[in-house]
Image (cartoon, rainbow, N blue to C red):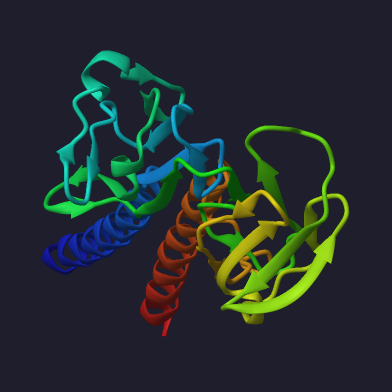
Amino acid sequence: MFSQQQDNMEVTALCIKLLSLMMMLLCEHDQKVNAASLHIDPNRAQFFEYESLTFYCEGISYCEVVHESKGKISSCNKTNNITLTGSSCILRNVYTDESGEYWFDAGGGNKSNSVNITITDGSVILEIPALPVMVGEAVTLRCRNKTTSSETLAEFYKDGVFIGNSATVNSIIRSVSKSDEGLYKCSISGVGESAESRLTVGESHQSLPDITSPSTPWIIATVFLVILLVVVVLYHFGKDDWNKG
């Protein structure tokens, strides 16, 4: 009797260990899904003075954005809104001294990714993504004239080197690679030149399992429950065979 109770206790302990491991992986999954990240709309690194933009704080209920030199942005207290995935904060009528790096406090001494923007009082900006783009994606760089929307010949530069011109003021990279990373700017003859902004290219994760998929936790739970069931069955069959022998 004592031996059977001991066996049952060992099986129970094993089940608890497996269930604990399953819960740990599920918690890790939830942390990745709800990871704090900062987005910007419109998604571009350059703005004309007096334009407005919106920061989206994913995975957090209050969007309190921080500027690298100004600290917490006070206007977020008035424009903070709850979204389906977190919260948002609007910056209206931005000024040149609001250029720089932005992030938000993600709690526990951690901060979100940063977004770097440039605000100019000039006549030309380069519309380039502020957030990283993935390898293989198509990216359009647009040279924008503040005073007119008519198409004008624009010149584009990467790391200070001329890379081409376009009569549609658009430069299209149809499949981005890591070699496309760098500092870009553009100019329109007789109008002016934009500031430089960095294009950042991240690795594509299409070939990897999507850890953020809603079905992922159920797959993890199912796999561990099957393993648990197999372990228990093999244990009991093994014990019966041993007793028979």
Residue 236 % position (x, y): 40, 66
The residue sitting at 43% across, 22% down in the picture is 83
Residue 186 % position (x, y): 65, 60
Residue 136 image-quadrant placement: bottom right
- The quarter of the picture where the N terminus appears is bottom left
Q: Residue furthest top?
A: 78
Residue 13 % position (x, y): 21, 61
Residue 231 image-quadrant placement: bottom left
Q: Residue furthest right?
A: 167
Q: Please state which of residues 223 and 157 is positioned toward the viewer in this rendering.
A: 157
Residue 148 vertical placement versus 195 (above, below) = above
Q: Residue furthest front?
A: 190
The residue sitting at 23% across, 60% down in the picture is 8
| Residue 33 visible in this rendered orientation of the protein | no
Q: Relative to residue 176, is residue 208 drawn left or right?
A: left
Count of numbered circles on the image: 0
Q: Please state which of residues 122 and 170 is positioned toward the viewer in this rendering.
A: 122
| Residue 197 visible in this rendered orientation of the protein | yes
- The quarter of the picture where the C terminus appears is bottom left
Q: Relative to residue 190, is residue 236 drawn left or right?
A: left
